[in-house]
Amino acid sequence: MNDASEALYERARREIVGPFLRGNMKNQGTQGTRSLGEVFYTIGGISITVEQVMDLLLGALEGGSNYWYYIPGFQEPSDMSKVPAGEFNSVELCAWSDGHIKICDKEAFYDHQSGNSQEEPQRWILNEEAMKKGLDLMHNQHIKHFADFVIGDGDANTADVFLQMCLFGELVYG
């Protein structure tokens, strides 16, 4: 990134992303009732719980994928009681029920914002359907990461692979 892009990035982190990730959503504080132990998806005879998927999602959004993604927008679920129960007052809840998170390439976003590129950055949608697709692809194409995830030994790389599988169907970054 050039100096102008870097300054824009820092301003966005301070003014937009920080408050956004701290939970400045319209329905902030609404308590979800979806049990973390509820089975979200079953693949290859393996039941994946809501809590396991939340761990992957948090790992990607709060660390594993920070080097490449930007969130230009989101749509809150229409009924926040259908999101996972717990202390999640942040953007990760928007991927549940009928909500979604818009994600784009960080560098493309800042290049466009700073005028270095006229091209609008491509945006991908993260929602429950995309998360199921990501789990399928991890299971079929990235078995080591999937196995680490299932046994509770996943890390930031595992979470990054998950997010990229959800959005792109392949590894694009890292």
Image (cartoon, rainbow, N blue to C red):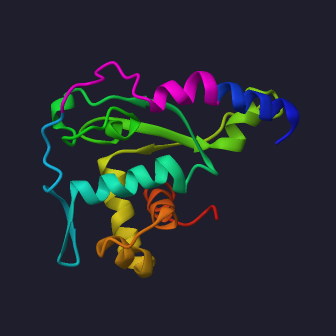
Camera-nearest residue between 29 and 57:
29
Percent position (x, y) of residue 42?
19, 68
* Rendered residue at 47%/53% (across/down): 60
Please report the bounds of the magenta region as a residue range: 13-31
- Residue at horizontal 32 percent and vertical 38 percent from the top: 93
Where does the image place residue 6, in percent across and percent down from the top left?
A: 79, 35
Q: Against 98, is 46 above or below?
A: below
Residue farthest to the top? 26
**Residue 58 makes an appearance in the image:** yes
In which image quadrant can residue 152 be found?
bottom left
Residue 46 is drawn in which quadrant? bottom left
Instruction: Find residue 33 and report its horizontal and vertical position in percent.
Output: 12, 38
Residue 154 vs 143, above or below: the answer is above
Q: Position of residue 67 (x, y in %)?
A: 64, 51
The part of the image, by quadrant, that contains residue 97 is top left
Name of the residue lying farthest toward the front? 87
Residue 119 shows in this picture: no
Residue at image coords 49%, 65%: 161
Q: Is residue 61 left or right of residue 118?
A: left
The N terminus sits in image quarter: top right
10 with respect to 147 (left or right): right
Q: Is residue 75 left or right of residue 12?
A: left
